[in-house]
Amino acid sequence: MENIICEKLSFSYPTSSASVLKDVSFSVSGGELCLVLGCSGAGKSTLLKLMKKEIAPNGTLTGCIKINGSVGYVAQNVEENIVTDKVRSELSFGLTNMGMNRSSIELLVAETASYFNLSDKLDNDISTLSGGEKQLLNLASVMIMKPDVLVLDEPTCQLDPVSAQRFVAVVRKLNRDFGTTVVISEHLTEELFPCADSVLVIENGKAVLKDTPQKTVEYMKKNHSPLLGELPLFMRLFDGADTVFKCRELLKEKNLPPLSSENDDTSVDMKLKNISFAYTKNIDVLKGLDLKLYRGKINVLLGANSGGKSTVLKVMANVLKPHHGKVKTERTVSMLCQNPLDLFTKDRCGDEVEFGRITDFLQIDDIKEQHPYDISGGQAQRLALAKVLQKNADIILLDEPTKALDYELKVKLADVLYRLCDEDKTVVIATHDIDFAGEYGDYISFLSKGEIVTTMPRREFFTSLNFYTTCTAKITNGIALGYVGEQDLNDGGMI
C-alpha cells in the first residue's frame, strides 16, 4: 500500500507569487525509506511540512497530497519540537493528550526510553542533554505515538558527526525493525544512500526523479546535476562503489603521490588565555581554555555537541563575560549565531540587509519580498551571513555556517571566506561539518569538555585521526599520504 501519494502538487507562499513547488508527483510505499535530495531553497522543507497537516504552511496549494496513516515529524532545529522541560514529561506529552491511562503511559515511556537509550536520562532536565540526545528525544517522542509515516527534515544538521551517525542508525533500525515508512531530507548521504530504497530528487521545485540510489547516481552523472556533490564521495569516485570499503579496494589500484603538510608562518590575531566560564554556579563550561586565532586564516573549532564551541564564540564576541581569563585582540569582531532567525527583526527580507554584490553572490536576491520566516533554512543562513558580512568587521565568527547549505552553496561560502582572508580578515568557524573543515580550514582546534585539546594545520590534524575525520581521509588512510579533502584528490589526479 502507498502511504504517500502526491499528484500535480504546486504551492506558493502568501508573500511570493512564485511557486515553491511546481506540479510535483510521486508516491511512497509502506515500509519504504525515501531520501529527498535538493539544493537549498528547492522546496524540500515545504514539501515535507505539507505531509503533516498540523504544521502545513499557509499558502496557495493546487493538486493534492494524500497520506494514508498517521505522520510523525522531526524538524532540523533541535529545539523546535521540545514542549516540556523534563525528559519523562516530553515522552509522555502526546500520550497524555490522547487521554491514555497513567499505568499504560508509564509502561510505554519506560519501553521507549530503553529502546532509544534514554533510560538513565528520564528524570533529567532537557536543558542538560547534548544536542544529539535532544534530537533522539525528539525522535522518541514522535515514535512513542506509533506513526505510520516518519518525516524528518535534515534532522542531523545541528549534530556532531558521531551523534549524527548514531541518529541515522536509529532511523534505519526503525525502518527495518518496524516497517515504518521514512521520508528524510538529509545532507549526510554517506550513511543514508546505501540503505535507501528510493531517492526523490527535487530541482527548482520540481520532482525530476524518484528511483533507486544506483539509478539516481547514473542520472546525476549523465545529466551533470548540480546535486552531484550531494552524493557520497565514494560513489562519485568509482562506479559501483557503494561503500567506503569498496572504494578503498579500488583506490589501491591507483598510485596517488603523497601530499606534504603545509607550513605557513602567520601572526596571532586574537588570544584567549586561561578562559573559564559558567552558565550555572560551580559548573564550568569552559575550563582554563587557551586558544590562538591566526590572522588572515580560516580557524576552525571542532568538538562534540555541548562541548562549548558556541560558548567560546560568544566569549570572543564579548557577548559572554568569562569569570576568569582574558581575551586579547585589537580588532573589531562580528558574529553569526547558530540560529539565523535570531538576527531578523523585519517582516521583509529586503529590509534586513542591503541587497547588492554580497547578496547576489550568495544567491538570495530572489527572496527580497519574502518574510524571513517563510524562507528555507539555507536561505535564512545566507541572509544572516550577508547581514554579518555587511558590518565589515576584522574578525568574523561563524557558528555552524554550513548548516542547511547544499554542496554548491558550501563552495560559494568557502569562496566568500577566502576573499575575506585575502582582505586580511580573520575567520573563526565552529562547526560539525568535518568535510568542510578538512577542505577549507587552515587551522583546526579540537574542543573537549571545555578545553582545547590541540590546534594543528588541517592536513596534520585530519591525518592523525581515525574516527573524527573527513571522508577523504577515511578512504585514503593507509593508501595515500596526506589526503584530507576533495581538492587533494583533484591534485592527485583522482577527480
Image (spheres, helix red, strand yellow):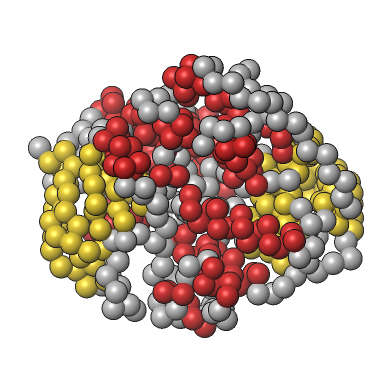
Q: Is residue 264 above or below residue 206?
A: above
Q: Quadrant of residue 376?
A: bottom left
In the image, 431: left or right of 208?
Answer: right
Q: Which residue occupies the extreme left position in the image?
A: 1
The answer to whether residue 346 is above or below residue 296 is: below
The percent position of residue 489, horizontal first and vertical second, equals 58, 34
Please name whichever residue, 479 or 317, is drawn nearer the observer in this view of the structure.
479
Quadrant of the image occupied by residue 243: top left
Does any portion of residue 291 appear in the rendered image? yes
Circle count: 0
Q: Residue at x 82, y 51 (%)?
A: 294
Query: In x, y percent, where is residue 97?
Result: 29, 51
Residue visible at 51% across and 37% down in the picture: 495
Residue 326, image x, y percentages:
89, 55
For image coordinates 12% across by 56% down, the residue present is: 7
The structure residue drawn at horizontal position 41% and vertical position 74%, both measured from the top left corner, is 366
User: Is 340 placed above or below 90 here?
Assistant: below
Q: Position of residue 323 (x, y in %)?
A: 85, 54
Task: Describe residue 425's horizontal placement relative to residue 169 as left or right.
Answer: right
> Quarter of the image holding residue 447?
top right
Q: Is residue 393 left or right of residue 430?
A: right
Can residue 95 be seen here?
Answer: no
- State which quarter of the image contains the N terminus: top left
